Structure formats: structure tokens, C-alpha cells
Amino acid sequence: MGYPASDANLHKVASLAQRLFKLQPADHGRSSVFERELNAGEDGVEFGADLIFQPPSRFLVDSLLDNDDLLEGPPSSRHDGWHDLDHGYSNSTYHHAVVDRRKLSLEWLSNACDRIVKECASQLSRDELAMAICRVLNSDKPGEEIAGDLLDLVGVSAFEAVQDLMLHRKELVDAIHQGLLMLKSDKTASNTQLRMPSYGTQVTVQTESERQIDKLRRKEEKRYKRGAENRVEDDLSATNFSSLLRASERRSPIEDLFGHGQGPNSLAVTALPQGTLRKHFKGYEEVIIPPTPTAPMKPGEKLIEIQELDGFAQAAFRGYKSLNRIQSQIFQTTYYTNENILVCAPTGAGKTNIAMIAILHEIGQHFRDGYLHKDEFKIVYVAPMKALAAEVTSAFSHRLSPLNMTVRELTGDMQLSKNELEETQMIVTTPEKWDVITRKSSDMSLSMLVKLLIIDEVHLLNDERGAVIEALVARTLRQVESTQTMIRIVGLSATLPSYLEVAQFLRVNPETGLFFFDSSYRPVPLAQQYIGISEHNFVARNALLNEICYNKVVDSLRQGHQAMVFVHSRKDTAKTAEKLVELSRMNEDLELFKNETHPQFSLIKKEVQKSRNKDLIGFFESGVGIHHAGMLRSDRGLTERLFSDGLIKVLVCTATLAWGVNLPAHTVVIKGTQLYDPKAGGWRDLGMLDVMQIFGRAGRPQFDKSGEGIIITSHDKLAYYLRLLTSQLPIESQFISSLKDNLNAEVALGTVTNVKEACLWLGYTYLSVRMKLNPLAYGIGWDEVMADPSLSSKQRALVTEAARALDKAKMIRFDEKSGNFSCTELGRIASHFYIQYSSVETYNEMLRPHMNDSEVIDMIANSSEFENIQVREEEQNELEMLARTSCPLEVKGGPSNKHGKISILIQLYISRGSIDSFSLVSDAAYISASLARIVRALFEICLRRGWCEMTSFMLEYCKAVDRQIWPHQHPLRQFDKDLSADILRKLEERGADLDRLQEMQEKDIGALIRYAPGGKLVKQYLGYFPWVQLSAAVSPITRTVLKVDLLITPDFVWKDRFHGAAQRWWILVEDSENDHIYHSELFMLTKRMSRGEPQKLSFTIPIFEPHPPQYFIRAVSDSWLQSEAFYTISFQNLQLPEARTSHTELLDLRPLPVTSLGNRTYESLYNFSHFNPIQTQTFHVLYHTDNNVLLGAPTGSGKTISAELAILHLFNTQPDMKVIYIAPLKAIVRERMNDWRKRLVSQLGKQMVEMTGDHTPDLMALMSADIIISTPEKWDGISRNWHSRSYVTKVGLMILDEIHLLGADRGPILEVIVSRMRYISSQTERSVRFIGLSTALANAGDLADWLGVGETGLFNFKPSVRPVPLEVHIQGYPGKYYCPRMNSMNKPAYAAICTHSPTKPVLIFVSSRRQTRLTALDLIQYAASDEHPRQFLSMPEEVLQMILSQVTDQNLRHTLQFGIGLHHAGLNDKDRSLIEELFANNKIQVLVCTSTLAWGVNLPAHLVIIKGTEYYDGKAKRYVDFPITDILQMMGRAGRPQYDQHGKAVILVHEPKKSFYKKFLYEPFPVESSLKEQLHDHINAEIVSGTICHKEDALHYLTWTYFFRRLVVNPAYYGLEDTAPEILSSYLSRLVQDTFEDLEDSGCIKMNDDGVEPLMLGSIASQYYLSYMTVSMFGSNIGPDTSLEVFLHILSGASEFDELPVRHNEENYNEALSKNVPYMVDNNRLDDPHVKANLLFQAHFSQLELPISDYVTDLKSVLDQSIRIIQAMIDICANSGWLSSTITCMHLLQMVMQGLWYDKDSSLWMLPCMSSDLVSSLGKKGISSVQQLLDLPKANIQTVLEGFPASRISQDLQHFPRVQVKLKVQKSDTDGGTFSLNIKLAKMNSNRKTSRAFAPRFPKIKDEAWWLVLGNPSNSELYAVKRVSFSDRLVTHMELPSTPTNIEIQ
């Protein structure tokens, strides 16, 4: 046994085994009796409830069961009881009058001998006596001699026993022979078994139950151990009785497979329940099984009342009083726990309500605060049939409607859109459909929400569709384990024998979650009749079948019951009904059928007469109805109603009725069990599922005491159905047959990436459970099992074999050495479109780049999906006729060939032809079901291969199949529901294509089709036909890459009925010369887009030398035939830029030591001894000359130190001049500040200031600073007024970091400041030295030219010149949708960490904060499933806990515990610097960050993973690509100079972009200027500063720009054809003229004859750095008394907020916010950044909780921007002299600072210690403002406060700014009588030192400032406004207007 076991345990196990033995399927007669006995027992325990099912270890139990003495030792009393009950004997007397035939077995003989031995004191033991009797009975003597011999053996006293023996000698002899036969086969089996696995035995044993196999194996082993003592001879002499007895009870495997022939022994009678009768008639045999009486209620068993449920749950059980018995027993587990459960119960036992209870439990978990959180969960109900799915959907949606739950069906017939899926809480689907959905990583988000999976009819596992359920469950269980989320699985099944294994497979705990109910739990007990017809003659057999069916129906009618007859084809329904009526006429039983006495008969008859179905009317007269899916819905409904009202007594229907409609009847007859299966291509037996479902309809729960199920089959199938329905066939797995397809699906999904994972995945299937229990059925010999009990090597072999086959078919790539799998496009397509592996092999062979129509149809016909379709003689004529009439294409092979037949049916489907013969109808239906997905898959395959011709060809066929219209037919046929066939036919005959129709007038069209009104109609529908116009701008980036900006303009009338919510278009760029597609993407055109402006798409395409004449851009509709648009890109006149990329060679120089600086102080700045090769090569130019330098080198090559050399040179030569360092990002500025503060500033004693949005230094600091570090915007703003700012002219060195960002969004500003500095230097004649730092550039020459860099100063190294070499891996991922695609990249990212950098630091770049969180959580989950959850953490627990206590961000605190950091702009500074420190010190190994980190913080890592190269652009409302510079910068972070020999970068991109990145990551990217788009603001600024006064100045100004340099080199990029001087100058002067005119229109400048001058709006725009559009909008919208609400709308409308990101689904958050804020916003534009800005402001004033952390960061940036915008608004109001608007606008500024509403909120809230209680308590005392508090005497404050600490308040009040104002009017002497106002301001707070403003809700620190406003309130006129700030006191004056009026100053 492997280890010793105690006696007690052995006895316990033995008794359990004995009970189990009784449950085993071999002797079902006994088991059902035993169940009933138990149920009726006094202990009142439910059957099975007291069995402790601990699935024991296999071999341990086996050896126990074999100890014969344990089983057959002293029988327990209960054991005896069973025997008595079983055999109907009282102890001593014999009733031989009726010995039930069921008992005549050797078992009966054994018991008889037992009694004889006891009573007659025989010398022989029981077994010896029995054996002797067997020998006598088996001899060839005549009967009398045998009787004599028997009397001699048993003695005269047992005379009756001898009589019984003689009476039933034949049966006993048969049993003996059976036993001998079995023993003989055992012997041969055992002999061969141990030598080698004999496949013969494996096949025969296949359907045996596992107990018998186990027994067989044990016997063999034991027998071999015992040696020869127990050898079985062929004759009886050497056989011991017990083995003969056991052998006789087993039936030969062959018999199991084939059933029996005729004769009395035609069934192993032991298998049937007690009371079974068998009758023989001429030509057929009948087996009648009595109903199992319903088990009585046990003591203590009670039904659960509905009112015991929660309130919300009762709503779903409206109309129910209580649950039934089964539901009550499982209620506790189902409703109060999360256990997985498996319920095995008979059909009709109310399993639907069990599902309902589980659903209510799930709903209960999401019912919080009296509100159902619907978005948190999904429930999936998997039903095996579409009809059942429809029934379940309608039942559940009706019952769950009170809870406001949405239930929807998702099957082949009912598709759901993405939105519908999101809104649905419960999805009812078929296994295949749910498999398809969970196979796609794009629907991961859906499967992640599933919390409850209900699988109905789990016994489907035995069916060929069972593999799908296994795949689903395995996928779900793996998801549960890997994500650590709870998904509850509820399995519902019919009574099945191997329920323990199914429970194990569903991960059900057998003690708590497994419920097994036998047939005694049927609500209506079922009597069953099995009739086997043995007549061989076909005609006679049919007649007999009809006659038997008729007799059974009549029997039922005589008892006053209704009957249903199930047949298996639609035609048969009418035939059978006819036959029944005919037979009733012959037998004169017609009255039985009729129902004219029914009170409603005459009424109903009229209704029936209206039906168009003649059969229906005819049969109704005779009281018979028919029902099948081919009837009209109304007729079917009518029939159902008539039957349930009793107006029809007999209903003849097909099996679909049993599934779809709940119509019970007392008697159900299944007439014949052969049904035609197009999938198998022939006849097959009715499956167990169908029979159970049909029998489930027998007996109407409310009316009948019992039901009757009758099955009429052929005699050879009789045994099969008896065993099936007395549930003796264990369920086997069908998974191996579809292993390849399922493995491919998992690889495509990304859940299985190598052999090890595949074996783990197999371990979750039912196959792995059954394989261990019944290895022979799966072709595994015992020797294999012995050698490898866990069968892991067998699993590995299965996986490897499948993987090899998939690799051969190019569906996955399988690397045998490492065992890794990677998915291919082909495999992914096969998985998504559910294409079988064998079909893919066919396509690989047959698909070519050029094929004609009939070849394509023939290839589709060769798909393995259709391989079972058969060709039949009787169909030939019809097929030939169809081929002539409905097939426009040639049929290869003709109708007599299988593929020919399929291709005829395919063509017939598209032609919408009609078919007569039944088998063809079902074949055609079967083909059409798969056709669409096969054609789609072929289209995708051609598209991926880049074949132009085949791609468009297959897309046409996709649409042809969807619409059932041939591509050559008229496209308006797609409106065939609205346009008459006549019109369409005429259009086709006249050859009027769409283009011609477009040009014609209505009346011409009318004339053309000879039907005048038709012209208008045709024209109308032409307008609905989807057209788009294409136009494209093509700009060459380099000689080999073109950038295409495609504009798509919809040109049709959108009608929801035809166009739905969105239309999909394929955008294809093809080169027809070379038959290749260079770019393809799917474009969604929504209804909203179709009305708006044209949609813009941008993409890059390659071009090759020699240039093809043209490329075509095609937009082809995905769903409308012949709807496509073309655009031709011609290469005739395209000017490509010169291909001159000059790289500087890296010279092989000896590294320079630091000492070459020649200055001790300088040397001490560096902690290394030698400069690197790049610094060495550039050292002389930088440190010893004044030349301008452009240094292009890859990230990480030490460019910053090169810049420092230039700074040190300036300090040496011109110490009084300033250095300005411009960095394009705040993050880089911050990094430079931190670095230089530590070194340059402290060690060289220099001054340094930072100028960014966060820091604005004062004038003094700027004057005294030696180094100014700034962002381009800040320096632009300051240097605009360079005339008045002396420090701008004191700049001696300008360092431009990352200058290649010229091409990015903020490039124009960089361009302007460089151009301006060069212009200033030329004006002041002070030279400014420029140092440009960038990555390797393609066009370094132009940049150098613009910066004024000469030959000596230009260094442009290759991208490969890195101090640490870089190894790059690019991996493409498909998937149309962004989020699921990111999701599918998580596992590869984890794999990359494990492969490339298991212990060294890793940086992962993602596009958004949300992605940082999701990626980190997924990595944690993968690490956990690898059983190393903390592999990325390297610090002790106590240190970790201390660090965690300092972290404020929740998500970060969670991920840090696993050694993964998050880094993004949403973190506060403390968290951010903590993370940087942990990562830099290797305390955490992985850092997931947004792309900004690449620029800002210098944290190199060994491995960099770039997860996705797109980000969501809130303005464009879609995902756009990162600039290539960002990608290079991120890659540059890989490889740490001090530690790594090489760095690694893994880039995970969207599949179509893979080739683009491959190209540009290795060759430098040219930098183009983007100044043209932003010229207006810069020209305006120069006009304001006086640099530009005329048009010539502007032209001169442009020549300084980089834009001008590039315009000459790459004119096509900027829309210029030629670079001839006159063309160039006219282009520029037109550009300047347009810009001036735009600025004039917006009110910023004024143009006059000789020049331009700035206006107020222009000056304000320049001063406050606003867009000219913004001030123009202010100018036109602000009025003299604009209200606060309007001001808020104007503020949020500023174009500065254009870039505010509105991320995915944020419109939902915006909608929620809009309901909680006081001012309305435009609800139709919730995805608009300006609406979001408005909501953020209002939320800030109302202090609302923001929905997500992103909004907090967004609010910060909005508030930050808003200050200068509001100040500009105040300036505009003040300049216009509007008092009230100015004041309102100032209030708005105060609101922004304080986060309060000016008019609604109490000013008390400005005090830090204020709380809502305090405000309300002060309010009751009449104090509502700070002023009132200040006016209170100190003594009174305490009394007012009542219990609040007064000290805090008085402290706050002391800090509250109080200013005393003194005014004095003075007459000014000089101006002759004008008055001025002298103002003295003094602060009253004596002890207040700081001038900081108290603004806790504003994100930045602010100093106090004051407005002095001088105005006249009576006419709302403003005279002057002044902004002042002071620390203690201030004296100032304001001019008064000359006309004296009442003046108010504020």
C-alpha cells in the first residue's frame, strides 16, 4: 500500500468501499433499491448526505477492496437487510410460485446454497455446493438425470429449491457461460496486458465502468502474485465459485457496444430497477420500468419558505410559496456561501431555481447602501442549446426585472454590441459562443467582471461538444488562480454516475458543494417503456413503428391524458400526424382524438381557420397538432396554446420543442431514435441529452401523479438506451479530439506560453481527472500508469504532439529545445474565428495570391468543418437542377462529388435559392452557419499576408455571404427590403451602375426603369448608400518613408436602420504593381463623426527605389458591397529630401584624464578619472574654443558633462556673463537643478535659478544668477521684451538640451527662442555661444546651419555609439482595442523580465497612470502564480514596513510590498523621490512609470520594457503614437554605465507598426519644423515687442528660423512643389500675409498701409503668454456686466485647455459630476476638454470629491493655468473700463485660490480651523463672515464659540490679513488742476511675519497681493486698477478722472 494503515482505518475504508460498491453501476437494480431503503430509513438522512466522500488515493483503496474477507466476511445486519429486500425471501420458506426473473443469477444460486447449507447441515461449504450445482446444471445429461443429481447433492428437504433450479436451468446456464466467457477473456487480456498494451483490449473495455476495469486489473495483479495456485482453467473444475459469480455479473464489453440480438436473454436483467417487466411480441420486445415512487419527506426536512429570503430576493420568486425539496436542501450552501456547487438531479426537478438562488446570492453581494452596483459583476449562464438559451433568457429577464437586472442572450442568432454587453448583468450563452468570447484577449475586460458562471447540463461533457465545456472551465479556473479573484462555478446536470469526478473537475468540494439526487426526486414520477423493434424488413418495420406509436397514444387518450409524439424531422411531423389520423379511422377511434365538446371549440376553430398552414387546419379537425421550427412563429404559438388548453390531445413535434418551450404532457412518445445529423453527415442515435430532456416533459407537475415516457427504437439499440437512462455509463472526456484547437486558443490568448504551462492547463480539464481513473479508455496501458501514476509524461506527450502539429501548420511557433510557444497571426485568426486546425492545413495548401471565384468556393468547400457532409444518390437530381438554376460559378467536381455538393450549397445560400429534400435543407443550414466566419478568416489571412487582389476579393465575399448577394449583382440590392425586385432587375438589365445613377436625374432614372415613381425612390436610396471621399496630404520624411495624412469625408445620409451605430471601413494602402499592401487599418465611422468635420488619420508607409508609378489608398466598407473610395498617390512630381546623413566617426583616441581641465576646483567636480570616448573627442572644441557646437549622440553617452565643459569655459573667459540652459521638460529642469546644485553651485560658489511653471524667480535673483535653467515657454515669455530686460542681453552661453524635440509639439517655441537669441546677438553685437545637444540626427547639417555651427563644431555620432551596447527586441501584438492589447502584453513583459533580467533592475514604460497600476498588479499576479510573489523585493520586512508607513498613495503602498514601484505625475513629490531612491539603490527591482520619467529622472536600468507605443490624445479622442524621440529616450535608459556589459530593451508594439519601429530605431529620424502651425502667436509677440513693424520684417524674421532651412531641403513636407527662388518667396509672403490677416480678424493687431501695430488684445496675449484665439474669444464674449457663470464658461473655453486629457470613459465621470454642480454644462459634449475644465472648476469651488486620482492631477494643472488666463481677463475688463465685470472677474480669481463659491459659501471657511459644526453654530449666533468675527471683542469670542478652542480661532484671526487704508486727495501742481489720490496701506496684524497667502486648496504656494480698483459704482465705470503687494506698509497714488464724480475705491 505504500504505508501502514491502522485496523480502524481499514475497517472504515472497507465499509465505505462496501457502500460505494453498492452504488457502483454494474448492479443498478440493487443500487436503486438501496437508495430507496436508505431514503426511507429511520435516521432521516438524505441519501448521500451521510457518506463521507473523500476521494481516496487510488491504489490504497484498490488493495483494500480486494481483501475478500473484508467484503464477504461477517455480514452486517444492514447488509443482510439489503439481501433480503433484494431477493424477496423470508428466512426459511421458499415462494417458488413467482420468482422474479430479475433474480435468476448466480447471486440467487449463492443465496439459495447458503440457506441449504444452514438448514440441511450439508457437508459442503456454500461455495463448494454452488460450484457442484453449476457443474451438474452445465452437463449434457437429460433433465430427469440432472434433477436426480441435484436431489443427491442438496438432500430431499430442499425439494422446492431443486424445482426452482430445474425451472430456470436455462437462465442459470447462460449465467455460467457468461461468467466463463468473461474469465477466459480476462485471462487472455491479462496475459497480453503485461507484455505490451494490446489495443484490442483497450477498445473493448472502452465503455466499461471504471470499477470493472479496476477489478480486472487487481485480479490480474493478484493472480500473478499468487502464482499458479489459482490459475483459471477453461472448464468449470478449476474455477472457484466467487470469481465465476462476479464474472457472470459483468457483461461482455462487446455486448455493451452492440446491444443484444433477440432471445430471452436479450438484456442483462440485473441492470434494471425492481419491478421491471419484459414482454415479447411478434417483431418487438417491450421493457416496462415502473415509476420510482417519490421519496417521502424525512423527519427534520423542511421546505424553505420564500419569505425567509432577503427582501430583494423575494421579488425574483414572486408567486412562489416555498422552494421544492431539492432547492431547499441545497439552499443553505447556494445562498449563504461562495462554494462551487454541482447539482445532479433529474430533469424537471427545478434546477432553474437553483441557478436563480445562486444568482440572487451574487446580486446580494453587490447590493450596498440600498443600491445595486451593476457595473461590478457579470453572471454568465451557459446553456447547451440556442432554444434553451432563449427560454432561459425570457424566464430570467422576466423574474429579475424587479431588481432592474438586464438579462440578454448571446448566441449565434443574437449578437450583442460592446455597449449592450457592458450594460448587461447576466449573459445567457452557448458554450461555443462563450468560448469564442473568452478566447479573445480584447474581451478580457468582460471575463474579468464575471463573478458567477452557471453551466447547465454539465453531462454534455460526454458529447462531442463536451470539449468546449472543459476548455471553458479550465480557462475560468486558471483565471481564478492567476488573478486571485472569486468566480463561482455552479454546475447543473442530470443524474450521472461519475458525479464525483465531475465535481473534482469543477473544483467542487464533495462534502459541501456536491448534491446528488436520484430519480425518486422527480416531481412527477416517470414510468418508462422501452420498445425494441426486431423486424428487419424496412416496410414492415415502418408499419410496425407507426402501429406501436398509435397504440401507445390511444392507451394514453383512453386514460384521459394528452400525448406528445417526438419525431426527428420537420417532414415527419406531418407524416406521423397523418398516419395517426388514418389509423384512428381504420380502428374507429377517431372520437378519442376529437375535442368538439370543448366549450371554446367553435371560437378557436375560427382562429385556426385564419392560419395559412393547411396541415394545421386539417389536423385540428382530428384533434392532432404539429409543431416544428419551420412553422411560422404565430402558428407555433397557436399550437402551443391549443395544446396547453387541451384543445389538441396529441401533438406531433420535433425535439426542439422539448428544449425551447416548456409544454409538458402526461405521455411522451419518442418515435424512432435515428436522426439526421449534417455535422456527422449521416444518421446518428438520439443523444442522452435529448432523451432526458424529452422525458423531462412527461408528467405535468400540477396535474399528474405520474408521467409516462415511451421510447420506440430498433432492437439492437434497446440495451444502449436502457443503460443510458438508468445512468450506468460513466461520462468520458472528449477533449483529446480537439486538443490542438484548444491549445492554439490558449496560446493565442497568451495564457499558455510553454510546455510546462500547457501541462498545467491540461491539469484543469476533465480529461486529466478521467485519464487517471480510466487510463485504458485514453490509450494508456497499465504499465504506463504504474511507471507514472500522475500521468505527467503522458500529458507532456499529448501537449508536445499537438504543439508539433500546430507548428507544422504555422499556427504557433514551437521551440522544441526551450519548450516555448509563440503565437502567429495564422493561429490567432484560427482561434478568433473558431477555425479547426485541419482547415488551416487545407488553406495553407490551397490559398494562393491569385485565385478565381470557383477556386475560392472550392477551397472553402474543402474546409474540415464540412468534411462529414455525405453525397446521397437520392439528392443527385435536385443538386443537378440547383447547379443549373442557382449557381453562377462553375462547380468543381460536379454534384456527385462531396466538395461539389458543398460548393453548390454555398452558391445556393448566396443566391437565396430554395431546396426541397430534407437532408439537403439541414446540410445547407449547417453549411451556412459556418460560412461567414470561414470567409472572414480567409480575408484576415490574405490581409496579413499583404496580398492586394485576394484581400479585396475575400472582403467582397465576406459581404456577399453576410448579405446573400453576389458581388456582381446590383449594389442597391442591399436595400431589397425597400426596393422592389422588379426595379432591381431592371437596373441590372440596363447595366446602370452607381456612378451612372448618381449623375442621372430622378426622372431619367424613372424613364430608365420604365416606372416614373421609382426614380425618386432609387435616388433616395442612393443617398443612403455609404460613400466616403478621400483626400490625402503626403509628406516625405526620408527618402524611404512617407507620412500620409488621410482625410475621410462621409458623403451619405445616415439612417440608423441601415447604418446602425457605426460603419467600419478598411483603409488599405496598396502597391498594385507588386501586389502588396503596405498599410491596413480598420476605421470606425460613428454617427456623430458622419455629421462633423472630416476625420483625419495619420500613418507612415515605406517607398522603395525604383519608385512604382503610384500607390492607391482604398477605403472599403466592411459591410456594404461595392462601397469603396480610391485615392491615388502619384510619385511623378514628389520631391524627396536628399539622402545625406553624415555621421561623425568615433575616433580611437586614448581617453583624456580629468586633469586636462587644468583647474583643481573643476577636477573635483567629477568622481571619475577619465572622460569617455565621446567627451574626449569633443573636449577641445568645447573647453578651449568659443565655437558653437551641435553634439548628436545616443542617450546615456554623457552629453551633459560635455555641456558642463562649455559652462566651465565661459566661467574661465567671461565670468560676468550668464549661462541659460533650456530643457524642454520640467522634469529635466528639476533633474539638472538637483545635480548642479550639489556640484557646480556649491563647489564653484555660483548662483543658479530655476524658471518653470512652478517657480518664477524675482528680478533680483535673475539679475544676480550665473546659471538660469528654464523651460522654453518661460524663456520665450521673458525674452519677448528683451529691450527692457537687461539680463536677457547678458547671456553668453545658451545650452539647448534635447534639441531634436524641435519636431515635437513644443518645438516651435524652441525654434523661436533660438532664432530670437541669434537675432538679439546680431543686434547687440555681443556673441552668444550656442551648444545644442540631441540624439543622433538624420539631418544634422540643417540644424547646425541654423544654430550657426561650423564644420569643427558639428559632432553627429551613430545611434550605435553607446557607452553600453544595447540589444533590442521588438514584439508585435494584434488586437484592435487598446486596453485589451495592453492587457495581453503583461504576460510577455513578465516573461521578458524573467528571461533578460531576472535579478537586475527593470524599467517598464507605459502610457498612462492607469496603465502603471494595472501593469504592476498583473506582474504581482504572475509572480505569485510562479510561487515567488516577492521576487522583486530586496529589503527586510521591518525596513519595508517603515517605508510603507511613509507612502501616501494607496496603489503604491500595495505594489511596493512586492518590490514593484509606480512612478507618474499623479504622485506627490515625497512619494516620487522615495520611489526613485528605492529603485536607484536596488531595493526594488521593477519600476513601472509613464513616459515622462524617460526624460526627467536619470534612473538607468538593465532592462527597459516599452509596453505599447501609443497614448490617448484627449484632443484627437483616440490613441496616437509616441514621437519616435520619446521611444529612443526610453530605450536610452537601458544599460547602466557602471554595472552592465550591455543593456536590453524590449519594445511591445501594435503588430502593424512593427516594421516602422524596426526601421527607425536603428536609423536616425530627421527633424522637421512645426513652426508653421503656431506662427500666429509668435508673429504677434514680435509685433508687440516691436521686432516686426512691416511685412519685410516678418519675412526677415522667418529667414532666421529652422523652418526656413527645412523648407528649402524638404519642400514637399511643407506643401511646396518646387524650391525656385520666386516660388519660395511668394510662398513665404503668402504665409506672412495670411498670418497678419488672421491676427487682424482676431483683434490683436491693426494693419495699415505701410506696417502693422499691436492692439490691446495682442499685447495682453503676448504679456500673459496666451493664444491669440483665446484673447480673441475673450474680446468677443466679455461685456460690461458679465455674470460669474458666463465668466466661468469663458474661462473654461480658453484654448489653453484644449490639451486637457479626456481619457477613455471619462465622459461618464463628467456626467456624474455635472449632476452635482450648480452651473449647467453642455451634456452633449461631455467628452470635450473645455466642458471637463468647467466641471473641474465647479467641483473645486464646491469641494466635491473627485472620482479618480487622475482628476486631482488634472485639476492641479487646470488651476495652475487659470491664474494667468483670469489675470488677462481682468486686464481686458479694466482696459475697457468695466467696473462690475472687473470685480466679478477678481472674485473668480479669489474663488480659484480659495476653492469656495464667492456668493454661496461663508467666508469663514477661509480660516484653517473651520469645520462644518463650527460654521453652523456660529451661523445660529448670526455670525456668517470673517469680518463679523474680527469685529467681536476678544472677550466675547469664547462665549460665541461654546466649547470650541478659542485659542485656535484667535491665532487664525491674527494671521488673517487686515489692512488699514488711508486716502488723501491731492491736487497735482504740474498738470493744471488734475487730482490724484494718495493711498497709504498698512497691515494691522502686528505679529504676522510672512506674506504667504493662506490658500490651502490651491496646489501651489502663493504670496499675498492686492488690487486697488478706482471706479464709479453709479454708472459702473472703472477709472484705474493697480496690483500691489507689500509686506508691512505701502504708499502709492492713483490719478483721478478730470470730471469730479462720486468715486469709490476698493
Image (cartoon, rainbow, N blue to C red):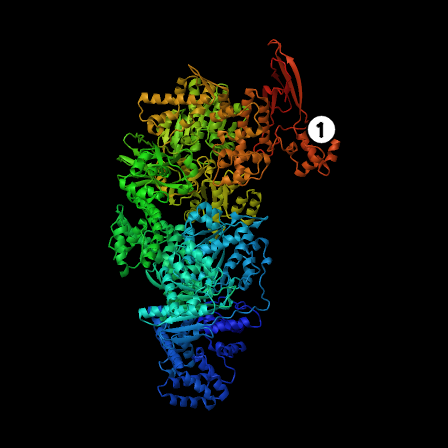
**Is residue 575 in sight in this rendering?**
yes
Camera-nearest residue between 365 and 541: 541
Q: Nearer the viewer, residue 513 or 622?
A: 622
Query: Does residue 234 appear left or right of residue 1248 in this picture?
Result: left
Q: Residue at x 50, y 81 (%)?
A: 89
Residue 1365 drawn above or below residue 63: above
At which x and y percent is residue 1111? 30, 36
Image coordinates of residue 638 in percent, x first then y, are 44, 56
Circle 1: residue type: Asp
**SS type, badge 1:** helix
Q: Quadrant of the C terminus?
A: top right
Q: Is residue 1867 above or below residue 848?
A: above
Expressed as whole percent of the image width and height from the top left, the position of residue 1349 reads 38, 25
Residue 1944 place in picture, x, y as percent: 64, 20
Image position of 282 (left or right of 695): left
Depicted 782 relative to depicted 937: above or below? below
Q: Is residue 792 visible?
A: no
Residue located beneath label 1 in the image: 1831
Q: Is residue 43 above or below residue 116?
A: above
Based on the displayed image, in which of its 4 quarters is residue 1823 positioned? Answer: top right
